Structures are given as C-alpha cells and as structure tokens.
Amino acid sequence: MSRLLMTERLPRWFFELLEEGCRVRLHRALDSGEGKVRACSDSATARLLALAEVCDGRPRPLLLVVPGEQDSRRIAAQLGHLLGPGREVLRLPRLDADPYRGLPGHPAVAATRVATLDRLVQGGSLVVVLEVAALLGRVPCRETIEAWSEDFALGGRIDLDSLARSVVAAGYRVTEVVTAPGDFARRGGLFDIWPPHESAPLRVELWGGQI
C-alpha cells in the first residue's frame, strides 16, 4: 500500500475525490526536484485537493505562490480547514509601504510579515501562502530574523533601558497603552509589549531588577 494512503491528517472522504495515481505523481514530482512540473485542472476544487495532498505530511516548509492577495487569503483559509491543526498554514502579505511618497506599511501587515518570517526560519511542517508581489519584495536574511527574538525567564535579570532601545530599533511603537501588535509601553518597573506572533500582549515586571 502506498504511504500516501496511510496519512491520518486528511479526512477519509478526501481520498475518494483525488485518484491515488494522481497523488503518487504529485509527490514524485515534488520530491524529484527535476525542474518545473505543471499540473492542470479546470476544477478549482481539484486544484485545491491536489495542493492539500502535496502539502500534507511533508516535514519541511513549503512556499505556495498565488496570483493576488484575494487568492492568498482564500487558499490559505481553505488549506487551513483541509489540513487541520497538524499543519500550519500562514500568509506572507506584500509590504504595502510606499517609500517614494513616505507612506509606511500598515502595522497589521508588518506584524503578519514578521510573525510569518520568524516562524519560517524555525522550519518544520509549515505552508506559507503569498502572492507574486510579496515574492518580489526583499526580506531580511535568516541571521537577521533569528536575531529578532530575546528570551526572558522568571527570576532572570534585565536592563529595561537597554530593552527599550532594542525594541525601538526593531520597529516597535512607543505608546501609553499597548493596544495592537508592535506596541510597547514602559511604566516604572513594568514593561508591556505585544510581539506580532502573539495573540495578546505580554508583561515583564521587575522587582529589584529581577523578573
């Protein structure tokens, strides 16, 4: 029996919709690395099922390039439902900043990009969906992304002045109250910060210089 039939992450009905020979050829083409492979279908459903089969159960990150932003949102949501919690599906939106007119990127877009790039360098089972415009944009190198994070532990010591300078250099916004990803605020020995990959802000509280 082919190993493609042994996966438990995709629902049972999935295999009734995509013929086994098609699944075998898709995996063989992706694993071979021998140039381009074109898989065509008039059915959007068939294309989605083929993408889900290719993405499921692979141990390394996969990059899925689609024409535009609406395509990336739709396909990322559909793949997320099909693949389930065992396989992360993230978007890498294009940076909507306009440096020629002095317009910065939207904070939510920047936060999504930072979170996705940070997760991407960690490797593992991951699908990143992006549009062509996002693929054409430059991103920081792996070493720079890995240097973005800092580790804190209960009982450890930290210099809040140094931390504040480092997060400002990293692009965080100084605010009175943290309300969105990318914000940080400091009040005495309290340091609130909302990293873009977290669903809620974090608080670092010092007592005599100790966390």
Image (spheres, rainbow, N blue to C red):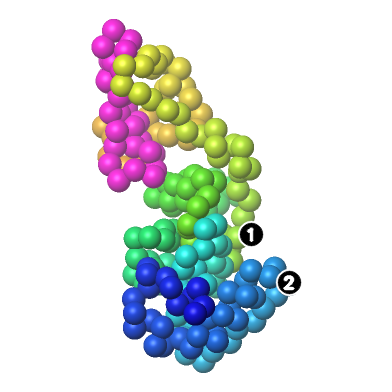
Closer mark to the observer between disc 2 and disc 1: 2
Q: For residue 19: magenta? A: no
- CA gap, disc 2 to disc 1? 23 Å
Whether residue 24 sits left or right of residue 191 in the image: it is right
SS class of the residue under badge 1?
helix
Can you identify the residue that label 1 sits on? 136
Residue 101 location, x and y as percent?
Answer: 56, 49
Q: Residue at x 42, y 28 (%)?
A: 151
**Dot 2 crowding, Cα within 10 Å, few <14, some 14–19, many 20+:** few
Q: Residue at x 46, y 86 (%)?
A: 18
Can you identify the residue that label 2 sits on? 34
Residue 63 location, x and y as percent?
Answer: 56, 62
Out of 123 and 57, give the one closest to the viewer: 57
Instruction: Identify the mark nearer the N-term, 2 or 1.
Output: 2
Q: For residue 190: magenta? A: yes
Q: Quadrant of residue 194?
A: top left
Residue 76 location, x and y as percent?
Answer: 42, 67
The amino acid sitting under disc 2 is Glu
The amino acid sitting under disc 1 is Leu
Q: Quadrant of the C terminus?
A: top left
Give the vertical position of 15 relative to 126 (above or below): below
Q: Residue at x 45, y 29 (%)?
A: 150
